[in-house]
Amino acid sequence: MKDFLIIGGGLAGILTAYNLLLRDNSLTIKIIDNSFDSAAWRVAAGIINPVSGKRIVKTINAEDILSSIIALNTLLSEQSGKTFFHPKPIIRIFRDNTEQNAWIRKLDNTAEYEEWIEKYDTSFLHAPYGCGIIKKGGYLDIRGLLKTMMHTIADKVIFQTSTFGANPYNNTHYTKEAQTVIMCYGWEMMYNPLWSFLPFAPFKGEVLTVKIPKQLSDEFILNNGTYFLPLHNGTARIGATIEHNQLDYMPTEKSKNKLLQDFFSMTGIKPEVVDHKAGIRPGIEDRYPVIGRHPHHNNIFILNGLGGRGAFYAPYCSSLLADFLLSEKEIPAQYSVHRYYHLYR
Ligand SMILES: Cc1cc2nc3c(=O)[nH]c(=O)nc-3n(C[C@H](O)[C@H](O)[C@H](O)COP(=O)(O)OP(=O)(O)OC[C@H]3O[C@@H](n4cnc5c(N)ncnc54)[C@H](O)[C@@H]3O)c2cc1C
């Protein structure tokens, strides 16, 4: 019998396994993953943006979250000689007066925002309402990170490629395999009877890979609601759309045209598209991750709700879960599954 069975080998699952082993190298872990080609982590751009949304708000615990990303990157770089977190300032292009005014208010609030944002004037972008710089942005090379992590923990972990079916028989079967089961297999957990009491709110996204246009600097990430993320290999990502009603993995012409139009309105450039993908983000209604113990089954745990910000949240949230599992360190209220216990019948 293993100490832990982790269902779902995406950002949530692999980072949780890594964090558990970091704290106790003698643990035995099995990870089950269905190797699905369009899983969110395989499609995601990996943008890290601590100051986001229409109201331009710094995320709660942004300092701790960024520290977790940097610490993880440092540790893995020492182990592998590779870098996974690439800091890059984000030019935020305002879409209307509301965003522009929100930005000005945040600039005035120097105590909270001075470290995070600054004024910026552009001559190379189209920004009729102005723009500004988010200083501590960047991106995480998710695929590189998970591949390296899996390699690092390979001798401690059994990886099994199979699909977990959430019927009662299977739940009993899997809980017999390990003392503790951690479920983190993305948005389809909404169909698992154990967790269906949670207010899941998954949403589809589409993302393009393009060649970086020669006219554009690759020093900045651009954002006017749609992101332009220059990567280090001569390509860039443009994404992502948000679609709540159509939960499928089909890339559409409509979304492609929207992304290209948003990019054109910032830059006046029509880039060459080399790839187009769709995925589904595991969202929760209040947009915060859910971490913790099942209200009824003592040995079953969850890490889900990473939404459109898994690259940003996963290093921090998987550490919180590992500390909770091994040291019973309390999970901060806004991330804890406790906040939804009242919905469980
Ligand atoms: C288009 C798009 C763009 C995005 N861009 C960004 C971004 O720029 N920045 C950012 O921070 N986040 C971004 N995200 C969000 C990010 O990808 C997710 O938050 C993150 O991947 C969630 O991680 P997860 O491990 O919870 O779930 P997933 O990534 O969905 O991983 C779940 C894993 O479980 C496996 N699995 C699923 N069902 C089963 C089953 N029944 N049995 C066994 N295994 C199973 C899957 O194959 C997968 O490996 C984006 C997502 C999309 C779709």
Image (tube, rainbow, N blue to C red):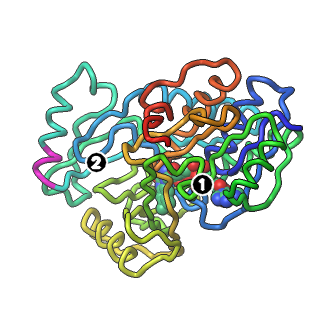
User: Residue 98 colored magenta?
Assistant: yes
Mark 1–mark 2 Cα distance, whole angstroms, equals: 39 Å
Give the structural element (helix, strand or loop) at label 2. strand
Check residue 142 for magenta coloring: no
Mark identifier at residue 14: none
On the picture, is 66 further left or further right than 28? left
> Residue at image x 38%, y 64%?
244
Give the residue at mark 2: 92
Kindly state the secondary structure of the residue where label 1 is placed.
loop
Mark with earlier residue (1, 2): 2
- Which residue is depicted at the point 13% across and 52% down? 129
Q: Image quadrant of residue 29? A: top right
Q: Amino acid at mark 1?
A: Asn
Q: Is the Cβ of the residue at disc 1 closer than 8 Å to that at disc 2?
A: no
Q: Residues within 10 Å of mark 2 (few under 14, many from 20)?
A: many
Above or below 266: residue 93: above
In which quadrant of the rendered image does the N terminus lie? Answer: top right
Q: Which residues are magenta?
A: 96-100
- Residue 15, percent from left and from top: 66, 39
Q: Which mark is residue 192?
A: 1
